Amino acid sequence: TRRSSDLGYEFELTYNPTRNWRLSFNAAQQSSVRTNVAPRMGQLLRDLVDNYSVVPTGTRLRGGDDRLTTPLSTPLATDTLAGGPLRDAIIGQVYFIQQALAGSSSPEIRKYRANCVGNYSFSEGRLKGANLGAALRWQDKAAIGYPNARLTIPGTTTVVPIKDVANPYFDDGSQFIDLWAGYRLKLFKNKVEWRAQLNVRNVFADSDPVIVQVQPDGSPARVSVPVPRQFVLSNTFTF
């Protein structure tokens, strides 16, 4: 278990330079700080090392069915009864990584986000009833992996491999541009309003895979399909 303290701020501004032109901007900042990370698991691992340390060759005992005749290994090695959990990828390593991240904002959280939107409506001339708009959506970078590092287990001279959470690999963040055009018209002696609009989301989309996780050496480990360009045509009738 762990405790997470989340904090965020959001700012929004709307401005009309003219009667027909509307601009809006919003930005957000967020953080997520982990505290009190796995206290029982930490105590369990410490007790594990302490208990085997007071037994002669205890930290060298191998696992297996015949523990009396199984040859001894190096202290707290991966194949020993005490070293196995410490080095296990889903027990010890996860615990040590979370402990290293405790007290600081998670690098996997996108700290900043921002959006800028503009729309212009034509109220006279040949384009009366039409509107044009654009939007920019931006997201900050986020951690997608960590290089390898080594940690000396407290109270021992044993070194185990962990992730270097102080120097994460980050993605490039993301930014998307949207465009739209619409038209509004009164029908049936102004009793019905018809509105049509075409939205193009992520106008400059590409087909390159997006790296969402990397290996300890920085090479890609997992990729995802990029956000595609989307065309959305809507028709609305208001009575």
Image (spheres, grey):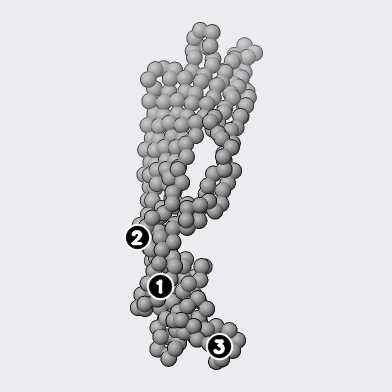
Q: Residues within 10 Å of mark 3 (few under 14, many from 20)?
A: few
Vertical placement of residue 131 versus 208, above or below: above
Residue at x-position 58% and y-position 23%: 197
Residue 98 in sight from this viewpoint: no
The residue labelled by disc 2 is 103
Disc 3 element: loop
Residue at x-position 41% and y-position 29%: 24
Q: Is 122 on the left-hand or right-hand side of 153?
A: right
Q: Label 1 sits on what residue type? A: Val
The residue labelled by disc 1 is 159
Q: Is 183 on the left-hand or right-hand side of 218?
A: right
Residue 170 in sight from this viewpoint: yes
Which-is-in-front pick, marks 2 and 3? 3
Vertical placement of residue 126 versus 84, above or below: above
Which-is-in-front pick, marks 1 and 2? 1
Disc 1 element: strand
Q: Position of residue 165 (x, y in %)?
A: 40, 59
Vertical placement of residue 109 versus 10, above or below: below
Q: Residues within 10 Å of mark 1 (few under 14, many from 20)?
A: some
Farthest-out residue, right? 188
Cα distance between the residues tagged 2 and 3: 43 Å
Sooner in the amino-acid sequence: mark 1 or mark 3: 3
Disc 2 element: loop
Cα distance between the residues tagged 1 and 2: 23 Å
Sooner in the amino-acid sequence: mark 2 or mark 3: 3
Q: Quadrant of the C terminus?
A: top right
The residue labelled by disc 3 is 70
Q: Tag on residue 68?
A: none
Residue at x-position 54% and y-position 15%: 129
Sooner in the amino-acid sequence: mark 1 or mark 2: 2
